[in-house]
Image: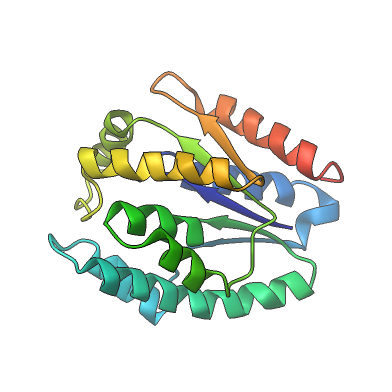
Amino acid sequence: MFIVFEGIDGSGKTTQAKLLYKHFLAHTSTKTKCILTNEPTNGNIGKSVKSLIKKSSINPTAIQLLFMADRAEHAAVIKEWIKENKIIVCDRYYFSTIAYGHALGLSKNWLETVNSIFPKPDFTIILDVDPATALARVNSRKEPKQYFEKAKFLDKVRKEYKSLSKQYNNIFIIKCNERTTVSQIHTEVMEIISSMAPFV
């Protein structure tokens, strides 16, 4: 099973991915079969991407191609995990490239086509939060802001994610706001997981 968490920066997807991973680890039947991974990865290309998105200006095509180059290496490992029947929990994947890339003005059709070579998730959970709430969380981290972390741009990305959820029947949206607790979101995540894969 290949599960992906998506959302704008500050949506809480990393927290929820970790919670789901911990849930699987707590069950002996899935303990040895669960992998937690993320994009950009910690490989050489992934590290370059992380460095570049901290800059004030990026060529949209160049950065998305770098994301995909990182994904190409990641996908090779994901394919092996799938063959081994691992449960894969991934923080960001190709829907990020499509949503962010299209928000940057790139062709959605091109983005979908070039990403079609990668393993498809069984389902994707998008955490939908307004940019103001997301950016408040990002700012509280006291880390350097990334190129993408701007309210107007994140609003565009949010709309792209909503559009994708209507296009694919294995994408689920969880609506969040500043009052939604981590526990409440995790409960909704588990309801989705149970409906899609009752054996876990």
Residue appearing at x 36%, y 62% in the figure: 107
Residue appearing at x 74%, y 46% in the figure: 26
Vertical placement of 100 versus 50: above or below? above
The quarter of the rendered structure image containing the C terminus is top right
Vertical placement of 4 versus 84: above or below? above
Query: Which color scheme is applied?
Result: rainbow
Residue 87 visible in the current orientation: yes
Residue furthest toward the top?
179
Q: What x and y, as percent, mark residue 59?
A: 20, 69
Viewer-closest of 93 and 40: 93
Residue appearing at x 80%, y 67% in the figure: 85
Viewer-closest of 137 and 95: 95
In screen coordinates, is 132 left or right of 69?
A: left
Residue appearing at x 54%, y 49% in the figure: 5
Q: What x and y, as percent, mark residue 82?
A: 73, 70
> Quadrant of the rendered structure where residue 47 is?
bottom left
Vertical placement of 194 versus 1: above or below? above
The quarter of the rendered structure image containing the N terminus is bottom right
Residue furthest toward the left?
56
In screen coordinates, is 70 left or right of 83?
A: left
Number of marks present in the image shown: 0
In screen coordinates, is 173 left or right of 169?
A: left
Residue 8 visible in the current orientation: no
> Quadrant of the rendered structure where residue 106 is?
bottom left
Vertical placement of 99 versus 172: above or below? below
Q: What x and y, as percent, mark residue 17?
A: 56, 48
Q: What x and y, as percent, mark residue 116?
A: 56, 70
